[in-house]
Amino acid sequence: QAVVTQEPSLTVSPGGTVTLTCDSSTGAVTSGHFPYWFQQKPGHAPRTLIYDTNNKHSWTPARFSGSLLGGKAALTLSGAQPEDEAEYYCLLAYSGARIFGGGTKLTVL
Amino acid sequence: QVHLVQSGAEVKQPGASVKVSCKASGYSFTSYSLHWVRQAPGQRLEWMGWLDAGNSNTKYSQNFQGRVTFTRDTSASTAYMELGSLKSEDTAVYYCASGGQLSIWGQGTLIIVSS
């Protein structure tokens, strides 16, 4: 079974930019992995921010964007806000199955 | 408004089974796959599998193969997740998620496995 790896923690200054990545043990992440990104705050259910690499839901703030970067899926936050402090998870597809990354704890400080 | 409402928390003995329900409202239940995800205390999200709510086809994570079953009742717009042979490590919050592109999440159901 594949292993999906994310940075355990990152810190960004308010108004700053940060990129979270999502790596696959099986090789380069492609659009065929249909990368998803979720935001989760303590005590709450996850919320889907990005689907299929770079598509946003209506509630996804414009400052979040998804992409493929250097063989990984990436979530870029441009203009970080205090309310963006949360855990972020990626999800990759493998022939019908899905695997979550370990999550990135993002601190806005 | 679109919602997924899950059943309430439960405490189970090791070796028992648990069945969690997930009731959909505000959208066409049979038009989307429904995923089950769990999260042990302080741990990462873990994908358990998905159910095609239209034709009841399923795909299970190999981590749960043989121990979990997904079913649905289309007349009640409700999906079910049954997990058997419970162990203390199954203590977690269990979520359902559905809608287009996993746009809708249930509130979560806490399952505690303890003797």
Image: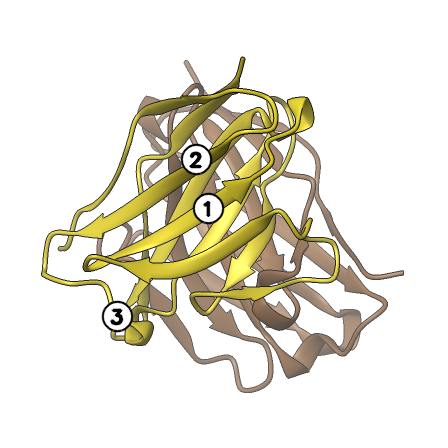
Q: What is the secondary structure assignment of the residue under circle 3?
A: loop
Element class at badge 1: strand
Mark 3 lies on residue: A30
Q: Nearer the viewer, residue B1 or B11?
A: B1
Q: Colour of chain A?
A: yellow
Question: How many angstroms separate mark 1 from mark 2 (CA)?
Answer: 6 Å
Callout 3: chain: A
User: From the viewer's perspective, is the residue at label 3 or at label 1 nearer?
Assistant: 1
- The answer to whether residue B23 is visible is yes
Task: For the residues labelled 1 and 2, say whether their Cβ atoms are less than 8 Å apart.
Answer: yes
The residue that disc 1 covers is: A76
| Marking on residue A18 | 2
- Nearer mark to the viewer, of 3 and 2: 2
**Residue at mark 1: chain:** A
| Position in image of residue A28 (x %, y %) | 15, 63
Q: Quadrant of residue B89?
A: top left
Q: Is label 3 on the same chain as label 2?
A: yes
Disc 3 and disc 1: Cα gap in Å?
Answer: 17 Å
Instruction: Please identify the residue farthest to the bottom as the structure is shown.
Output: B55
User: Which amino acid type is shown beneath numbered disc 3?
Assistant: Thr
Residue A2 picture location, percent across and down:
15, 54
In this rendering, the answer to whether B41 lies above or below A73 is above
Chain in brown on the image: B
Quarter of the picture holding the N terminus of chain B: bottom right
